[in-house]
Image: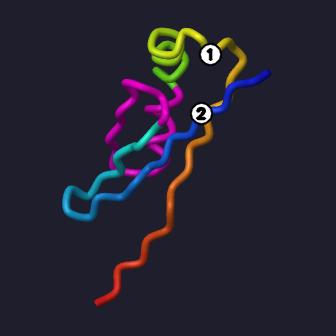
Amino acid sequence: MTKAFTVTAVWDPDAEVFTTVSDIPGLVVEAGTFEQSVDLVRSPAPEIIATNVPAAQAPYTVQIVTTPQLALA
């Protein structure tokens, strides 16, 4: 059975970056755009999962999401 992980990119308006919240222990990403967040997660995620979640057997999926936010004046 495929293990699924979720990474949520949250916009920080004060720092003007996306930071991640994840169920992958040890995966923390900060980037200027959502697309950069996706790229930064894609690269280290397999190794971090293998190291920090050894019970998870490949293949696994990583869903990267963001939530829309609307700033109102």
* Residue 49 part of the magenta-drawn span: no
Of residues 30 and 67, the one drawn nearer to the viewer in this rendering: 67
Q: Residue at x 26, y 58 (%)?
A: 16
Q: Residue at x 69, y 14 (%)?
A: 58
Residue 20 screen position, x and y as percent: 39, 43
Residue 1 screen position, x and y as percent: 79, 21
Q: Sequence order check: which comes first, mark 2 or mark 1?
A: 2
Question: Mark 2 is on which residue type?
Answer: Phe
Look at mark 1 in the image and give the residue it sits on. 56
Q: In this view, does 62 lie above or below 45?
A: below
Q: Is residue 36 left or right of residue 63?
A: left
Q: Are marks 2 and 1 in contact (CB under 8 Å)?
A: yes
Q: Is residue 46 left or right of residue 44?
A: right
Label 2, residues with CA under 10 Å away: few <14, some 14-19, many ≥20: some
Residue 38 screen position, x and y as percent: 51, 40
* Label 2 – label 1 distance at C-alpha: 10 Å
Q: Which residue is drawn at 33% across and 49% down?
A: 32
Quadrant location of residue 10? bottom left
* Residue 35 part of the magenta-drawn span: yes
Q: Is residue 71 above or below residue 24?
A: below
Q: Residue at x 56, y 43 (%)?
A: 64
Q: In this view, does 53 lie above or below 26?
A: above
Of residues 7 and 38, the one drawn nearer to the viewer in this rendering: 7
Q: Residue furthest bottom?
A: 73
SS for callout 2: strand
Q: Which mark is residue 28?
A: none
Label 1, residues with CA under 10 Å away: few <14, some 14-19, many ≥20: some
Question: Mark 1 is on which residue type?
Answer: Ala
Look at mark 2 in the image and give the residue it sits on. 5
SS for callout 1: loop
Magenta stretch: give its range: 23-42
Q: Quadrant of the C terminus?
A: bottom left
